[in-house]
Image (tube, grey):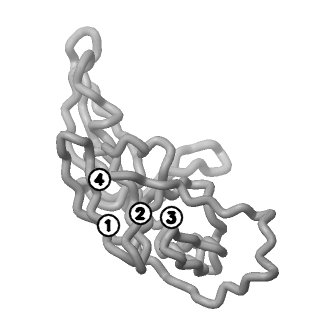
Amino acid sequence: MNFVIQTVDKEENMGAQQIERTIEFKCVPWRTRMTDKGLQAQGVPGTWTLIPAEHPFAKTAKGIVCCPECGKMFLVTPEMGEQGDRPYDRIFPAFRCECGLIAKAVLLDWGKKTLYCAAFETRDPNGKLVANKEYMHAESEEDAKKQFWAAHPQMDVWVHLVGVAPVIGFFALDKAERKLTV
């Protein structure tokens, strides 16, 4: 499966070319499967998806967009595009595909992930259990667990994941530097 990183040159002269079409790409999970050729994604034309954590480009790319006309997929990096009028949207003023499609593309729900907390236990050098918490933004509980285990491979340290859940409060310091639960 070949992916192309689509970029838009801001210095490009768009004066002669009028972008008349706007396409809103919904963020939906795509089917993925591991094959002997690596992770394969089944794109859904006219949508985009967050890049799976196990994808080889997961450290540099944010998602994958699928052209609504031909189904060609493009990698999208976090710095690409511009913030839209709604805070969770990302806009690409001149989305271009090899099939000839040129449009203003709006990726819906670009930054809309839930904050999760993973509660887990480790052992100190004396074998005593130590309670820990770690926070991450994820699409789902399953995604949060995948992120947790990707960051905590069980090679040298014993780790027991107690549970993962959406955060329903967070901590702040008051004027006297005391920790408050909000």
Q: CA distance from mark 2 to mark 3?
A: 20 Å
* Circle nearer the viewer, 1 or 3: 1
Q: CA distance from mark 4 to mark 1?
A: 19 Å
- Return the disc, 2 or 4, that comes first in the chain's sequence: 2
Looking at the rendered structure, the kind of residue marked 3 is Gly
Looking at the rendered structure, the kind of residue marked 1 is Gly
User: Helix or strand or loop: what does disc 2 sit on?
Assistant: strand
Q: Which residue is mark 2?
A: 73
Q: Which residue is mark 3?
A: 111
User: Helix or strand or loop: what does disc 3 sit on?
Assistant: loop
- Give yes or no for contact between labels 1 and 3 (Cβ–Cβ under 8 Å): no
- Return the disc, 2 or 3, that comes first in the chain's sequence: 2
Q: Which residue is mark 4?
A: 143
Residue 58 horizontal/vertical position (percent)? 42, 45
Circle 1 residues within 10 Å: few <14, some 14–19, many ≥20: many
Looking at the rendered structure, the kind of residue marked 4 is Asp
- Give yes or no for contact between labels 1 and 2 (Cβ–Cβ under 8 Å): yes
Res 176 visible: yes
* Viewer-side residue, 161 vs 153: 153
Q: Is residue 162 left or right of residue 9?
A: left
Looking at the rendered structure, the kind of residue marked 2 is Met
- Residue 79 sits in quarter: bottom right
Please report the residue visible at 77 percent of the width from the left and 76 percent of the height from the top: 14
